Image (spheres, coloured by chain):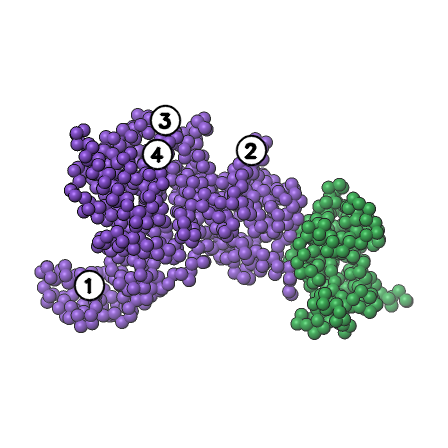
Chain colours: A green, B purple
Amino acid sequence: MIRFFKKKQTPKFREDHIYKVRNSKKYSNFEDIRFVALDTETTGFDYENDRILCIGAIAIKNNKILVSDAIEIYVKQDVFNKETVKIHGIRKNGSEEKLSEEEAIVKFIEYLDDAVIVAHHTAFDVTMINMALKRLNVGPLESKQLDTNYIHKKIAKTDTYKKIFSLDELCEIYNVKMHDRHTALGDALITAYLFLKQTAKYKKNNALNLFDLINTNYHLLK
Amino acid sequence: MKNTIAERIYDFLKNFPPFDVLEKEQLFKIASNVKVLYIEKDNFVFKQAGNPHEHFYVVKDGAIGLYRNMDNEQILVDICDEGDIFGLRPLIQNDLYLMSAKANEESVLYAVSVEILKEIIQTNEKVKKFLIASFSSNIKTPYAKGTNGQLFANIEMQTSNTSFTEIRSAEFSKNPVTTLKNSTIKEAAQIMSEKRVGSILIVENRNPIGIITDKDLRQKIATGLFSIDESVTAIMSAPVKTFKPKITVAEAQIAMIKNKITHLCITKDGTNKTELIGVLSEHDIVVMHGNNPSLLIKKVYRAKDVNNLKYIREKTTNLLKGYIEQNIPITFISKIISEINEAITIKAIELSLEEMDKKPPVKFGWLALGSQGRKEQLLMTDQDNALVFEDIPPEKYQSTKQYFLQLAKKVTEKLNVIGFEYCPADMMASNPKWCLSLSEWKNQFDTWIKKPTEDAIMMCTIFFDYDLVYGDKKLVSAMSGSIYESIKSYEIFLNFLGRNALKNPPPIGFFRQFLLENDGANKDYFDLKSRALMPLVDAARLLTLSHQIKGKNNTASRFKKLIKVEPKNQDLYLSCIDSFNILLQFRTSQGLKNNDSGRYVDLNNLSKSEKLKLKGCFKPIRDVQELLNIRYNLAQMM
């Protein structure tokens, strides 16, 4: 009885999401995996009180960044923090076409499909999205996740156990040009570049295997 | 939905050919479908003989080397840097990769779908031409029949973009003076006098059918050939040449020179079947343009002293500038400028002859040498000339030679004042070494041919391109005849000439600010003359000599003649002509821009499309040198 009730509460996008991720046949072959480099712009760093203003994401498949497979969603929010406007430049009533939080999240999850999420400090972006899902009474993302910060730690020879690398630092290390920094899609692209370069380096030692990569992710066990 | 990344890619691509000529929507479609790749140093994008990918590549950052494998050796063919495209030909021609592409440094590439490009090629002729042209520098046999004559078509596209505004529409006289065909000549002349005009048009239903000018009245009426009571149709020039109202100054000039006419009729649609709306006379053009080739030549004839000639030569430079800006074909420009140069030289000789105490003791010929002899001298470069006089008894030799040396001194002085500076190597008729009797010249050529030292070969490259400017034709043909006799009896001379022609191979291409030399040396300056123009000039000379072709001194006409003699090499020679014309035009515009000889090109100042244009010319040079190498077995001689 309770189970039946619960099931009825689960919206279709959530069901689809779980189905796609759990049944995907692509994960075993690196060339087939669709990665989605993700970045969110938010009103701040408080998971409870801050909100997502923009989600930017771009897909990577078979070592290529697919410009045609990108998404940039602006989100209508009542929460507003004029301090962070300086960073991301998204005003409360800016001219961008904005979606409601629910529309935005549904659209993003549909876009995400069975992709593996790649982000920089992935825990932050994913938690922000999970909090939005929670407000919709929906469970968290099930997608597999990677973090350019941890992939780097695995590649870097020196002991960097405690060090947290910023996106800017990694761009410096991997010689990635920074354009459109602090826009969601811009940072997503930078992350995608980092990911391409990191996987190229990673490949040198071992053949590429998603689960090896995921194992770099000891903080994000998924 | 907005896609910031696609916009960024759009902004990048739009700076580089062929993307710069795409419609905005077309380029945006390409940008939105780009795939971005990262290639680590020393990794391959594709390998020779591999199957074509679905995409071709544009270098975003880094550098990709293109290599060909030959006998287990990788030969660097080209380096592509920011904005260069590669890996396209196999996709379009459905062929395997002919080269390997390897990252010389870590690189970011944009992969562009060939399907989208194919769609665009269907509708965008300019892109198609660019691509055909760019293949010519990348593929094994660029002279495929299918692309005949279009290999360099992109040049036209690139320059027309920039000079479009330079082409002014000619302003013609509206409401031209007309009369009907049943008028008499007298009536027509009366109307002309009344309206104070030099020409009258004969119309039928407002369409122009003929024209009468002052000249017709002078030549046909005043001489009594026709009565003034006859119909205008008796003396009118018909049919008239008609043009569209949008005719440019340049087109009008060409039309007048080509048809040897001084008046053009402007009709509604450019045919003589529509209403006459105006007349464009040579005079209108002079007023508009200030410079007119036929007028300049007329002025040369009338010139009273050197200062007049100097003025005319300066005007000629303006004319040249105008032509280059208006993108007039270089073959036409060189014809006109050479005509004027020749007329000026003739006038300088005539003026000098007048200054001499007595008439020349014997017949003589004034020869232009080198680029002027080949009629390829567009900019003011230094003078190279020589003099030949008839054989005379030994006792008269000294006085005769003195006479011609004195004459030559006067001529070269004048040419120097006019702006043709003295030859630093003193290759001038005023030098006793180059002011010789016919037999002396025959001996001189014979010595050069039979003892082909390095100096002798160098002399041959200058003196073989002579052109009689003034004087006796027979002397010159006797000279040419003897040269061919000498070569016939000592054919190995051609091999020496061939070795000289291969002295300067063209570079592979450009990389960033550097010239990509075959031997890897880098330079900031490119010697356009010795590395690009001279190899073609030398090749053309050698090949015409080997076929005993006489009377062809101009590089383009030498190749044209060669096509007739060796039809199997038609495609190669055609591309040599194209290259030569492009290079000559390039040198001329560079020279005009920097007010120098245009010989040394600063690579830092070249745009991407200029580099591409030059690069396209290197391929035919390499190929014709290869042909010489095989034909004259030069590898053994090196």
The subunit letter for the residue under badge 1 reads B
Provide the residue designation for mark 3.
B492
Q: Which residue does the image show at 45% across and 58% down from the upper left?
A: B161
Q: Are marks 4 and 3 on the same chain?
A: yes
Q: Earlier in the sequence, mark 4 or mark 3?
A: 4
- Contact? badges 1 and 3 (CB < 8 Å): no
Measuring from the top left, give residue A7's x and y in whole percent: 84, 65
Provide the residue designation for mark 2.
B70
Provide the residue designation for mark 1.
B213
Q: Quadrant of the C terminus of chain B?
A: top left
- Contact? badges 3 and 2 (CB < 8 Å): no
Determine whether B90 is above or below B322 in the image.
Answer: above
- Three-letter amino acid code of the residue under disc 4: Met
In the image, which is nearer the foreground, mark 4 or mark 3? Answer: 4
- Three-letter amino acid code of the residue under disc 1: Thr
Provide the residue designation for mark 4.
B459
Q: Is residue B537 left or right of residue B304?
A: right
Q: Earlier in the sequence, mark 4 or mark 1?
A: 1
Q: Earlier in the sequence, mark 1 or mark 2?
A: 2
Q: Which residue does the image show at 66% across and 72% down from the upper left?
A: A95
Q: Quadrant of residue B212?
A: bottom left
Q: Are marks 1 and 2 on the same chain?
A: yes
Q: Earlier in the sequence, mark 4 or mark 2?
A: 2
- Three-letter amino acid code of the residue under disc 2: Met
Measuring from the top left, give residue B541's x and y in whole percent: 35, 37
- Three-letter amino acid code of the residue under disc 3: Ile
